[in-house]
C-alpha cells in the first residue's frame, strides 16, 4: 500500500472498518483485523494479542500470513516488543531494524532475520485491550511514510472499537457460565431459521434436559455442578456444532437448532438426538451417572407461528419423553 494516495487509504480504511463493525464473531473479527494490519504494513505476517482478563497478561489470539493463512510463532519470540508497546501505550515502527540498536540487539530479530517490525496498541476508552504486531524480512525504511504510520494507528483505533462491540455482543448473547449462546440468542436464530424454512427444506429444534442433574449439586455442591454444566455444554457443542446451533436454554436444559436443509428433517433430528443422548450417557460426576431426555419438533408444521410456539411444542415433546423414563427421545 506504500504507493497509494491518502484518499485511497481512507477509502480502504473505511471499507475495512465497516467489515470489522459488521463482524460480531470475535475470532473472525481478530483474523480480519490481523489480515488488514498485515496488508497495510506490507509485512510478511502479523499477530494479535489481547489482555487476559484474569492474569492481565497478553495472550496471543491469532497469527496470519500475508496470503491470509494461519501462522504460529512462540509468544516468547514477539513478547518483548509486544509487552513494551502494551505497557507504554506507544507504537513501534521499526521499518529498518538494523538502524534501531534496541531492536537489532534482540536475539529474535537476528534469528528470524527480520528487517521490519511494527506494533501498535489497541486502546479503547484509555484501556489497552492488547496489541497488533507485524514483521517482515524486507526493510521499508525508504517507502514507509508518516501516512502509512497514521493509517496503522487509525486501523488500530477502529479495531479496538470493533473488539469492544464484539465483546458486548458476546456478553449479551452468550451464557456466562458455559460460553454457549443463551436462550435469547437461540430464539432470535430460531425465528430467522423459521423464516428460511419451507416444505422442501424443513428445520428442527431439539430440547435436551439433563435428568436429575440436581443430584450432582447435592452430592458435591453448586460449584461442582457448574463445572459439570460447562463440561456438558462443551460435549454437546462438540457433538452437534457441525449440525446446527447449540445453546444453553435453561438451568440444566440445552437447545439444538437444526437449520433448513434438503432431505428428511426427521432423520436429521433423530441422528443428532441419539448422538447427544449417547454423549450425555457417558458422563459421571461425583458418582452421579447422568442421562438426557430429549424432545424435538420440526417446522413447517401445524399450530406453529413463532419461535416461542415452536419451543413450547418441543418442550411438550420433551415432557412426553420424560414421562416414559430417563434417557428417552421423543
Image (spheres, helix red, strand yellow):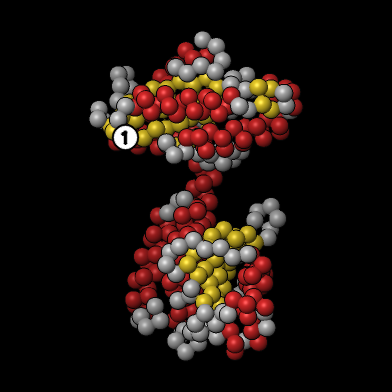
Quadrant containing the N terminus is bottom left
Residue 81 position in % (x across, y down)? 64, 73
Q: Position of residue 187 (x, y in %)?
A: 43, 33
Q: Position of residue 105 (x, y in %)?
A: 68, 83
Is disc 1 surrounded by few (<14), some (14 to 19) or many (20+) residues within 10 Å?
some
Query: Taking 245 as reference, is 232 left or right?
Result: right
Query: Which residue is located at x 39 percent, y 64 percent?
Result: 16
* Residue 149 appearing in the image: yes
Q: Residue furthest top?
A: 324
Seen from the viewer's position, the closer of residues 296 and 302 is: 296
Quadrant occupied by the C terminus: top left
Task: Judge from the rendering whether residue 158 lies leftward or rightward of residue 199; answer left or right.
Answer: right
Tell which of 133 and 155 is nearer to you.
133
Image position of 171 with respect to 150: above or below: above
**Residue at the outermost right position:** 220
Residue to which mark 1 is pinned: 261
Amino acid at each position: 500500500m506504500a504507493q497509494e494516495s491518502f484518499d485511497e487509504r481512507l477509502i480502504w480504511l473505511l471499507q475495512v472498518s465497516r467489515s470489522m463493525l459488521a463482524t460480531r464473531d470475535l475470532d473472525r473479527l481478530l483474523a480480519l483485523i490481523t489480515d488488514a494490519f498485515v496488508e497495510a504494513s506490507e509485512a510478511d505476517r502479523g499477530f494479535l494479542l489481547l489482555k487476559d482478563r484474569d492474569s492481565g497478561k497478553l495472550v496471543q489470539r491469532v497469527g496470519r500470513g500475508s496470503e491470509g493463512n494461519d501462522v504460529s510463532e512462540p509468544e516468547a519470540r514477539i513478547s518483548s516488543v509486544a509487552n513494551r508497546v502494551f505497557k507504554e501505550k506507544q507504537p513501534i515502527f521499526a521499518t529498518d531494524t538494523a538502524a534501531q540498536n534496541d531492536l537489532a540487539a534482540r536475539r529474535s530479530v537476528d534469528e528470524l532475520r527480520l528487517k521490519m517490525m511494527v506494533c501498535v496498541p489497541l486502546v479503547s476508552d484509555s484501556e489497552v485491550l492488547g496489541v497488533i504486531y507485524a514483521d517482515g524480512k524486507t526493510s521499508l525504511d525508504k517507502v514507509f511514510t508518516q501516512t502509512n504510520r497514521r493509517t496503522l494507528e487509525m486501523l488500530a483505533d477502529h479495531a479496538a472499537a470493533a473488539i469492544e462491540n464484539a465483546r458486548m455482543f458476546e456478553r449479551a448473547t452468550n451464557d456466562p457460565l458455559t460460553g454457549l449462546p443463551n436462550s435469547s440468542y437461540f430464539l432470535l436464530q430460531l425465528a430467522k431459521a423459521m423464516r428460511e424454512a419451507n416444505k422442501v427444506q424443513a428445520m428442527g429444534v431439539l430440547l435436551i434436559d439433563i435428568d436429575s442433574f440436581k443430584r450432582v449439586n447435592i452430592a458435591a455442591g453448586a460449584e461442582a455442578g457448574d463445572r459439570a454444566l460447562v463440561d456438558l455444554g462443551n460435549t454437546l457443542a462438540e457433538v452437534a456444532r457441525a449440525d446446527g446451533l447449540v445453546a444453553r436454554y435453561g438451568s440444566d436444559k440445552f437447545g439444538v437448532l437444526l437449520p433448513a436443509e434438503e432431505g428428511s428433517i426427521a432423520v436429521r433430528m433423530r441422528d443428532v438426538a441419539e448422538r447427544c443422548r449417547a454423549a450425555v450417557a457417558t458422563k459421571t460426576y461425583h458418582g452421579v451417572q447422568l442421562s438426557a431426555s430429549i424432545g424435538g419438533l420440526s417446522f413447517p408444521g401445524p399450530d406453529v407461528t413463532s419461535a416461542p410456539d415452536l419451543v413450547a411444542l418441543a418442550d411438550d415433546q420433551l415432557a412426553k419423553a420424560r414421562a416414559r423414563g430417563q434417557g428417552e427421545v421423543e
